[in-house]
Amino acid sequence: MKKNILKCTLISALLISTFTACGENQDANVNYSIGIVSEPSRHEDSKSESPSADESFECIYESPTANDSYYYNEYNEEYSVISENTFKSVTTNPLSTFSSDVDTASYANIRRMINDYGNVYDTDAVRIEEMINYFDYNYAPPADEAFSVTTEMSECPWNTSNKLLSIGVKGKEIETDRVPSNIVFLLDVSGSMNEADKLPLMVEAFCMLTENLTENDRVSIVTYAGNDAVLLTGTPGNEYETISSALYSLEASGSTNGAAGIITAYELAEEYFIKDGNNRVILATDGDLNVGVSSVEDLEKLITYKRETGVYLSVLGFGTGNLKDNKMETLADNGNGNYAYIDSISEARKTLVEEMGGTLFTIAKDVKFQVEFNPQYVSEYRLVGYENRLMNDQDFFDDTKDAGEIGSGHTVTALYEITPVGNEIPLKYQPEEEAEAVSEFTDEWLTVSVSYKEPDSDESSILKFPVGKDHITDFPSENMQFASCVAEFGMLLRGSEYSGGITYNDILKTLHSLDCISQDKYKQEFAELVKIVSENYN
């Protein structure tokens, strides 16, 4: 009864949206009514503590009259516009703050573009941090903390007068077979999914995931098109035949009312909530939501409320053409989850089988980074990528501010290009001033601080890692060299003004010198992608 009241109340208030057709102009003037939404609850003891139907609050959905944060390209795909990070002066901006990001969708998506077309057809699809973090790096594992932090600094390969700082994080690995999972498969079966690289691939991907579940796990399946439907509820994970039969019965047709499916999926996740377990909704879609709550802004508001239930959200993107990357990224980023793009059976296996622990099991949430630079040594800095993950400096200490999650065994890498003091462009009309020590920490170039919460906590812990002269090396590790190659590739694909004189052939030369290429099939594949673009570019 509660479910029907909730759904009817919210959806009836929001269906006046004019987003009723695939590819319709998102800039249209739209006004939304006030909807009454059941207030999310955190599960502290059991699912029985879920709020009653009368515990609700008002949520006002307003769509802007104009929106320039994303656009359609000729393939009818949507990507959020990226404004590349610029250099910041340490004198006026000594702090750099950003959220962690373990999404990998961008790399798999541009791989699809390159394999199909020889290059990328939308530079805003290139998110360099997601390209870098697609790959695994053999950072030292943590001892007692949730993760370890590895830093090193060397000559910047695309601008040899500058330094390149690498910050590498390695999440602790947990024994995932001992953590029961309560998973809701939220599957888009609308007409736009009726393509070989969408619904059929999605079914195979979830069947592979199911093969690795146990009797201690619970699976529910919700589908949505014009309306949502519940196929399974709380089914034991080892009942493979039951789950796979439901998956193979799916057919694609109709419009896409994703919001209705999201509401139902979260309700089921709360109903079968497992204390100290992995409670997660996995949404599989091409992102083409065109009925009900469908704008990026309104989806962000909906998911922001729903994440307070303690249920995490992972998003899997599928398909070529009509891909709404901006909406899927928004859902994952605001749902305490991650976003991956599945373009093949191989990628489905990597995401849902080989890396299932990192994809589905969170070991730290709201992970934020803040780097403080010492003006005695650093004049300017530029964060490579993470443009849509930047945060206000004061947000680092604010536990109410949402940030990214890190999963079991995940690695996260961030790169900074640094201009050392003395390497600045000389100015004719401003006399140089003697560099003065600003503190007693005269050997430190910078300090990396990491704020994070345990999965079941609302209070942050902060770790600090000073970086000094002893971190500077003339012989960067293969981790750093490979990450640099990926960053260079991303900058060239984006046409970055900061790529210097680097070429695709330069990247290939470095890649061929690294032992890790022959030891990792995904890094081998990356080298092949660079080669394809290089040949087409030349």
Image (cartoon, helix red, strand yellow):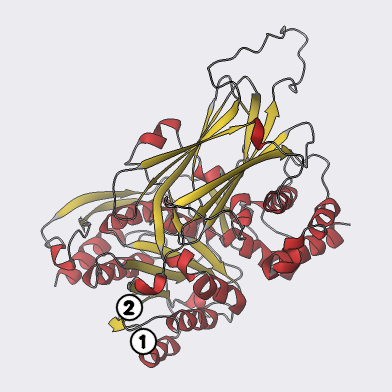
Q: Residue at x 60, y 21 (%)?
A: 375
Q: Quadrant of the N terminus?
A: bottom left
The answer to whether residue 27 is seen in the rendering is no
Q: Amino acid at mark 1?
A: Asn
Point out residue 106 in the picture as x, y percentages from the top left corner: 60, 59
Q: Which mark is residue 178?
A: none
Q: Dot 2, how many residues are within 10 Å of its Cα: few (below 14), some (14-19), or many (20+)?
A: many
- From this view, report whether residue 44 is shown above or below residue 83: below
Q: Is residue 348 visible?
A: yes
Classify the position of the C terminus by image quarter: bottom right
2 and 1 marks in contact (CB < 8 Å): yes
Q: Residue at x 59, y 63 (%)?
A: 76
User: Which residue is the site of mark 1?
Assistant: 238
Residue 351, position in %: x, y? 53, 70
Does residue 444 lie above or below 280 as drawn? above
Where does residue 74 sit, x and y in percent of width and height? 65, 60
Q: Nearer the viewer, residue 40 or 168?
A: 168
Q: Amino acid at mark 2?
A: Asp
Circle 2 SS class: loop
Left or right, residue 67 beside residue 493: left
- Quick one: 84 or 63, which is closer to the camera? 84
Disc 2 to disc 1, C-alpha distance: 8 Å
The residue nearer to you, when weighing 398 against 466, is 466
Residue lying at the far right of the rendered structure: 538
- What residue is pinned by disc 2? 217
